[in-house]
């Protein structure tokens, strides 16, 4: 039964009997609330969820008739059950009410109790379906928010923030997007952002996000993967199979590593981009696709075009919007915030590790590292460090970073080998002691040494001063 009923009653004595009958029909657990005017009705409908609204056709809110009030309600909620009532009924009045969007029409007149009971019973199933739909909408919203959070771009970099805005701006525009960047910079993340920002209009749902790594398939298989194939197209093709273009209908097709494809394959993609048409492998029928193409590569496409390895025409079509993601080393301000983001994510998976934190020295070491694998490498470093130990603090040694790069070791390269090794060892010892405030036990742990081994190294290099 409806448990929350809202009645527009501008003059309490006119609709008083109707309200009493509704309260009886809905039961003691129901709530029947009256409002006096259309403004109050609109406000309370906006603020709360109601099972049923009752409006009198002629009384309305005292200034507007019921049909005008109904029109205002329908602008806010197309599905809210609204019963229009009248003192006397006729076919024309009922028709006008239903045409205006009323869920049903009720004549007040004689035998009001029976009429209301019948009306409430008719509404009961509709309210149940509406409740189920609302619950499903809430569940979908939770999933959508979780999905959006999963693909949220975490950044403090002004340059990357501008790229996020560019991706959101081009999202609603049904044109190709080309994403360029080194491996691990987050090209697929930006492709998801473009997809999430897209809109297909009020009456057409947004399709799926479908990703294909073009470098993961041999070319004949890649063509079948994207375009599908007809039965008998090749050995083992015993039935017609849809391709990724069909699966991405009204959605987004993400072509990763498109720079690694052949010219022949690029020409086939060019046709889809230009005309929105393609043919299944082994087929003759021309099919249409409205999937938006987002392509990405870490290859130097300008060099590839000069060397004849990439079609300039395809580049021109894909480059409606070009998003060039800078490497992580070019935006060091993102390293601490990303490290903390990944730490919270992985710690959240294992409650026993909730106290783990990155030490100041570990954050400093991360900030000094070049990350040739970019954000993906940083994620992997933090993941290994989180699960490697259960100590509260993650130190430099826990990160497992590679030895310093050539840039960091340049100051040792002018020395003979034995002196360079010794100088490097001194540098490691001094850095560890500085990072731990002179705490030798902690410095030993960070360097992966026993306490006695650390003392030996300090004595060997003349650093044992205490």
Image (cartoon, rainbow, N blue to C red):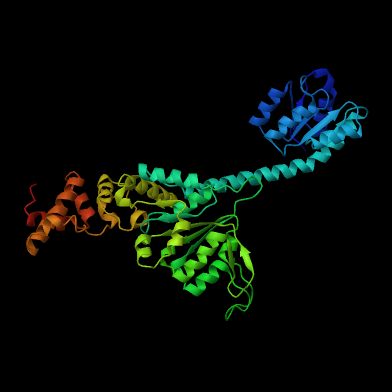
How many numbered marks, from 0 up? Answer: 0
Residue at x 43%, y 47% (from the top left corner): 153
Q: Position of residue 115 (x, y in %)?
A: 89, 33
Q: Nearer the viewer, residue 210 or 301?
A: 301
Q: Quadrant of residue 280?
A: bottom right
Residue at x 26%, y 44% (from the top left corner): 360
Q: Nearer the viewer, residue 7 or 387?
A: 7
Q: Is residue 116 visible?
A: no
* Up/down of 363 relative to 46, above or below: below
Q: Is residue 56 left or right of residue 398?
A: right
Residue at x 41%, y 65% (from the top left corner): 310
Q: Position of residue 157 (x, y in %)?
A: 35, 43
* Up/down of 104 relative to 367, above or below: above
Q: Is residue 139 left or right of residue 123?
A: left
Q: Nearer the viewer, residue 159 or 131?
A: 159
- Point out the image quarter for the N terminus: top right
**Outermost residue, bottom direction?**
235
**Outermost residue, right direction?**
110
Q: Position of residue 440 (x, y in %)?
A: 17, 49
* Up/down of 158 relative to 15, above or below: below
Residue at x 14%, y 50% (from the top left corner): 430
Q: Is residue 103 left or right of residue 235?
A: right
Q: Position of residue 353 (x, y in %)?
A: 39, 50
Q: Is residue 179 visible?
A: yes
């Amino acid at each position: 039964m409806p448990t929350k009923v809202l009645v527009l009653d501008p003059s309490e004595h006119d609709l008083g009997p109707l309200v009493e009958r509704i309260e009886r029909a809905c039961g003691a657990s129901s709530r029947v609330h009256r409002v006096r005017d259309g403004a109050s009705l609109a406000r309370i409908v906006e603020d709360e969820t109601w099972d049923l609204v009752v409006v009198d056709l002629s009384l309305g809110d005292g200034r507007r008739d019921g049909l005008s009030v109904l029109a205002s309600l329908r602008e806010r909620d197309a599905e809210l059950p609204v019963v229009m009532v009248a003192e006397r009924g006729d076919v024309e009045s009922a028709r006008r009410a239903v045409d205006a969007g009323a869920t049903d029409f009720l004549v007040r007149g004689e035998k009001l109790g029976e009429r209301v009971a019948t009306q409430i019973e008719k509404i009961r199933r509709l309210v149940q379906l509406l409740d189920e739909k609302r619950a499903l909408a809430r569940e979908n919203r939770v999933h959508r928010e979780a999905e959006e959070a999963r693909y949220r771009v975490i950044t403090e970099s002004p340059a990357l923030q501008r790229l996020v805005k560019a991706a959101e701006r081009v999202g609603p525009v049904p044109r190709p997007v080309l994403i360029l960047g080194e491996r691990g910079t987050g090209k697929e993340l930006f492709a998801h952002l473009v997809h999430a920002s897209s809109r297909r209009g009020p009456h057409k749902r947004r399709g799926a996000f479908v990703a294909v790594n073009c470098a993961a398939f041999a070319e004949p298989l890649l063509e079948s993967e994207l375009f599908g194939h007809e039965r008998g197209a090749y050995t083992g093709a015993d039935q017609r199979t849809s391709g990724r273009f069909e699966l991405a209908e009204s959605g987004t097709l993400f072509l990763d590593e498109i720079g690694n494809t052949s010219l022949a394959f690029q020409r086939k993609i060019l046709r889809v981009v230009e005309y929105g048409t393609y043919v299944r492998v082994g087929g003759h029928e021309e099919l249409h696709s409205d999937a938006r193409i987002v392509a990405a590569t870490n290859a130097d496409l300008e060099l590839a075009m000069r060397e004849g390895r990439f079609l300039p025409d395809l580049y021109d079509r894909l480059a409606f919007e070009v998003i060039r993601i800078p490497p992580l080393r070019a935006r060091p301000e993102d390293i601490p915030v990303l490290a903390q983001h990944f730490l919270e994510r992985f710690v959240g998976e294992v409650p026993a590790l909730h106290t783990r934190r990155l030490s100041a020295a570990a954050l400093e070491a991360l900030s000094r590292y070049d990350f040739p694998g970019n954000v993906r490498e940083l994620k992997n470093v933090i993941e290994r460090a989180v699960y490697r130990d259960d100590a509260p603090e993650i130190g430099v040694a826990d990160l497992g970073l590679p030895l310093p790069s050539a840039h960091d070791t340049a100051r040792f390269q002018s020395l003979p080998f034995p002196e360079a090794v010794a100088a490097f060892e001194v540098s490691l010892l001094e850095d560890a002691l500085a990072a731990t405030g002179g705490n030798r036990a902690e410095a030993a742990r960070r360097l992966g040494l026993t306490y006695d081994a650390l003392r030996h190294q300090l004595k060997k290099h003349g650093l044992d001063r205490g």
